[in-house]
Amino acid sequence: MCVQPASGCWCVEVWPRTYYLGIGQPAEDKIAAVCLVPRGAEEGATLEIDRDDLQLVANRPVSFRLYSSLTRTEDRPGQVWSLPPVMRACTRTRRSTP
């Protein structure tokens, strides 16, 4: 999104996707996930998720499933959804260098 104030033009980066954290075990027909970052959130924005059912344990290894969507535009941080299984988990690939 670009804004044109009187002194010139400056741009604000926005997230083009909505990001979700998978919770529980995925079922065949649904994936339970909590919305972390809604589509259109500005880069550097502080988002608060106040849910008593989500807890973090410090100093322990963790793994989780991260999902994203380009089409879900109305979800808000902290909302839990049953998402369709066509949602793909975000993956990080490792590159080995010779």
Image: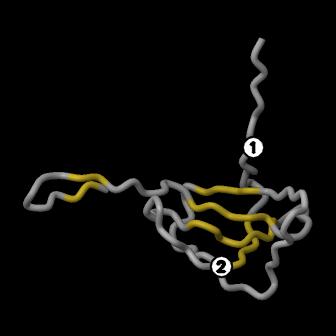
* Image coordinates for residue 41, horizontal then vertical, percent: 47, 65
> How is colour applied across the structure in the image?
secondary structure
Q: Which residue is mark 2?
A: 78
Q: Which residue is mark 1?
A: 91
Number of numbered callouts drawn: 2
Which quarter shows the N terminus?
bottom left
Count neighbours of disc 2 (C-alpha within 10 A) and say few if under 14, some if 14 to 19, many if 20 or more: many
Residue in view at x 75 percent, y 69 percent: 33
Secondary element at image label 2: loop
Which quarter shows the C terminus?
top right
* Image coordinates for residue 74, horizontal then vertical, percent: 52, 73
* Image coordinates for residue 9, horizontal then vertical, percent: 17, 52
Could you say which quadrant of the image residue 32 lies in? bottom right
Residue in view at x 82 percent, y 66 percent: 30
Could you say which quadrant of the image residue 57 lies in? bottom right
Q: Nearer the viewer, residue 36 or 59?
A: 59
